[in-house]
Amino acid sequence: MAIKDEADAPNLPNSTELAVDRTNLAHERTQLAWVRTAVSLISFGFTIYKFFQYMQEQGGNQPVKRLLGPREFALLMIGIGLVSLLLATLQQWRFRKKMRERYQIIAPSLATALAAVMAVLGLLAFIAVILRQ
């Protein structure tokens, strides 16, 4: 078994690069957790709205007026999901800006792109509930 020269050894990342990668990935996982939470809130709100709309159409009776009916509850849930997604994305952008200023080696974020797609879908659900009386 021959001993290799240092010139033959592959260039391995140093501990700082690995620590930056781990920190970046931790923030990506956090962003994805917020995306899952927001999608759950948005889909739950929209599902509640569609369920009660279906029940009203099947029953044919007029809905009882309440302070917080199914439509208002749906708007509240979808709104909370969208706001949480927005706040999580803003937090991610601030982190990434700080990391780029210090290390310049931060790759583009797929979690932020996914958050943007989910925000568009959430806005469409919000608009659908608002426009449908």
Image (tube, helix red, strand yellow):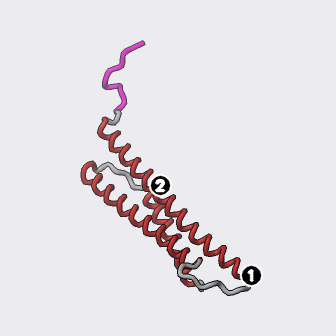
The numbered disc on residue 59 is 1
**In this view, 41 is above or below 71:** above
Region in magenta: 1-11
Tell me what residue is drawn at x 48 percent, y 67 percent.
81
Evaluate if marks 2 and 1 touch, with contact meaning CB atoms under 8 Å apart: no
Say which quadrant the C terminus sits in.
Answer: bottom right
The amino acid beneath tag 1 is Gly
Q: Provide residue 77's location: percent of width, then percent of height.
A: 52, 70
Q: Secondary structure at mark 2?
A: helix
Instruction: Report the side of 76 relative to 10 (left or right).
Output: right
Q: Provide residue 127's location: percent of width, then percent of height.
A: 53, 79
Q: Number of callouts in the render?
A: 2
The amino acid beneath tag 2 is Ala
Neighbor class of circle 2 (other Cα within 10 Å; few <14, some 14-19, many 20+) is some
Q: Main secondary structure of the magenta part?
A: loop
* Residue at the extreme left of the image, as rendered: 102
Q: Does residue 8 appear in the picture of this structure?
A: yes
* Residue at the extreme top of the image, as rendered: 1
Tell me what residue is drawn at x 36 percent, y 16 percent.
3
How far apart marks 2 and 1 lie (CA) works out to 39 Å
Q: Provide residue 92's location: percent of width, then percent of height.
A: 37, 58
Let me know if residue 69 is in the magenta part. Answer: no
Tell me what residue is drawn at x 54 percent, y 75 percent.
73
- According to the picture, the residue beneath numbered tag 2 turns out to be 33
